[in-house]
Image (cartoon, helix red, strand yellow):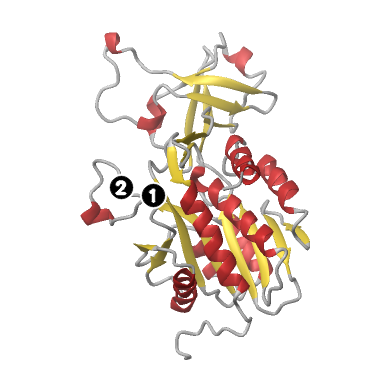
């Protein structure tokens, strides 16, 4: 990955983007994409969409959600401690002892998630997020309420890092990497003669309700859609591969197989990978994908969908880890597939 492109990825990863508060990251995404797009579309959900070849009747929607899991303040006690609920799939065990950035209504401040000292018994057995609290250093409810109110959001205070010049690690790779990938696909296609319309969407709210994907697909009415998300890597200790499959970092992009997935789109992706001599991996999505693909598929008259995922270690933790090589290969795969399309492709599985 070129240094300039890596810098853009790191900028996205450094920008807090909790579900429902994606405005800052979307503005940065638009600033980066605008020079390469024919048009930028936004909507009332908060999606940002870069468009190429708008007048083409065959329209491809690429969706990578920019929101990340977060904490939401639900109570402030008299001593000034904050209590929180989940905004997405927060693992309370991963939260112990973490620093957080609280995006207060009046000021952004730092807090720490308190933990009972081991000398005092530590934390025993199972516990929930409601058993933890955030200490911002305030001495009273009145003091902290000058900056924070009920409903304000917080994310882990964790800077992204490059490991061994091959992996990127940090919070919220799920799925700011996807927002990065769709932007890069649009950038790479911008200097090519393409026969299809391309709508690269940085979608919102996937971690909580997937409403952004619905708004995007309902508004665009695409011929087909591809969700660009992450999936569970199983190449680290303690993972049961018999149960969860065999997905590796550096193993290439992951294609989904299951009832929601259009087989003809997958065939296009597989044929493209063969032309590029690129390995792909597979995951199973028998009933639902758990991604933006599910909402896009059920808009309008129905949209044929596929899911291309980035292998990710330590999902929904502060140290999610992915391969830079896999990111580059997913971009290459999508660029080559779209550039080679005629716009006459049939996605009907009953047609030859």
Taking the image as shown, residue 43 lies to the left or right of residue 19, namely: right
Identify the residue at horizontal 68%, vertical 51% (top origin).
46
Image coordinates of residue 267 in percent, x first then y, are: 45, 76
Could one spot residue 89 in this view of the protein?
no
Taking the image as shown, residue 153 lies to the left or right of residue 294, namely: right
Taking the image as shown, residue 226 lies to the left or right of residue 187, namely: left
**What is the CA distance from the residue labelled 2 to the residue labelled 1?**
7 Å
- Asked if residue 188 is positioned above or below residue 80 in the image, the reply reads below
Q: Tag 1: Cα neighbours inside 10 Å, few (<14), some, or many (≥20)?
A: many
Residue nearest the observer in this picture, 337 or 76: 337
- Asked if residue 30 is positioned above or below residue 273 in the image, the reply reads above
Where disc 2 sits, the SS reads: loop
Q: Tag 2: Cα neighbours inside 10 Å, few (<14), some, or many (≥20)?
A: some
Identify the residue at horizontal 55%, vertical 52% (top origin).
178
Q: Which residue is mark 2?
A: 235
- Asked if residue 75 is positioned above or below residue 182 in the image, the reply reads above
Identify the residue at horizontal 63%, vertical 12% (top origin).
143
Q: Quadrant of residue 152?
A: top right
Image coordinates of residue 36 in percent, x first then y, are: 75, 57
Could one spot residue 260 in this view of the protein?
yes
Nearer the N terminus, badge 2 or badge 1? 2
Taking the image as shown, residue 34 lies to the left or right of residue 226, namely: right
Tag 2 near tag 1, CB within 8 Å: yes
Q: Which residue is mark 1?
A: 249
Q: Quadrant of residue 286?
A: bottom left
């Amino acid at each position: 990955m070129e240094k300039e492109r890596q810098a853009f990825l790191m900028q996205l990863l450094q920008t807090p983007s909790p579900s429902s508060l994606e405005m800052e990251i979307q503005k940065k995404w638009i600033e980066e994409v605008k020079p390469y797009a024919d048009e930028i579309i936004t909507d009332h959900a908060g999606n940002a969409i870069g468009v190429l070849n708008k007048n083409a009747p065959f329209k491809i929607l690429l969706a990578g959600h920019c929101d990340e899991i977060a904490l939401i303040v639900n109570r402030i006690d008299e001593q000034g401690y904050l209590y929180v609920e989940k905004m997405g799939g927060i693992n309370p065990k991963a939260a112990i002892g973490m620093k957080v950035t609280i995006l207060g209504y009046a000021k952004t401040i730092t807090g720490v998630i308190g933990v009972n000292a081991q000398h005092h018994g530590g934390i025993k057995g199972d516990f929930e997020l409601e058993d933890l609290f955030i200490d911002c250093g305030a001495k009273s409810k009145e003091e902290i309420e000058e900056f924070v109110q009920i409903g304000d959001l917080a994310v882990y205070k964790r800077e992204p890092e490059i490991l061994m010049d091959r992996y990127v690690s940090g919070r919220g790779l799920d799925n700011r990497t996807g927002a990065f990938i769709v932007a890069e696909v649009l950038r790479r296609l911008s200097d090519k003669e393409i026969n299809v319309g391309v709508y690269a969407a940085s979608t919102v709210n996937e971690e909580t309700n997937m409403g952004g994907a619905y708004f995007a697909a309902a508004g665009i009415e695409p011929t087909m859609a591809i969700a660009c998300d992450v999936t569970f890597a199983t190449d680290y200790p303690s993972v049961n591969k018999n149960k969860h499959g065999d997905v590796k970092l550096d193993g290439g992009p992951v294609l989904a197989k299951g009832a929601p997935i259009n087989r003809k789109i997958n065939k296009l992706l597989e044929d493209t990978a063969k032309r590029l001599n690129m390995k792909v991996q597979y995951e199973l999505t028998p009933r639902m994908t758990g991604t933006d693909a599910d909402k896009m598929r059920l808009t309008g008259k129905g949209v044929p969908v596929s899911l291309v995922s980035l292998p990710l270690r330590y999902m929904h933790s502060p140290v999610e880890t992915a391969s830079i090589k896999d990111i580059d290969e997913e971009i290459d795969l999508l660029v080559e597939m779209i550039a080679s399309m005629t716009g006459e492709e049939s996605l009907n599985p009953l047609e030859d």
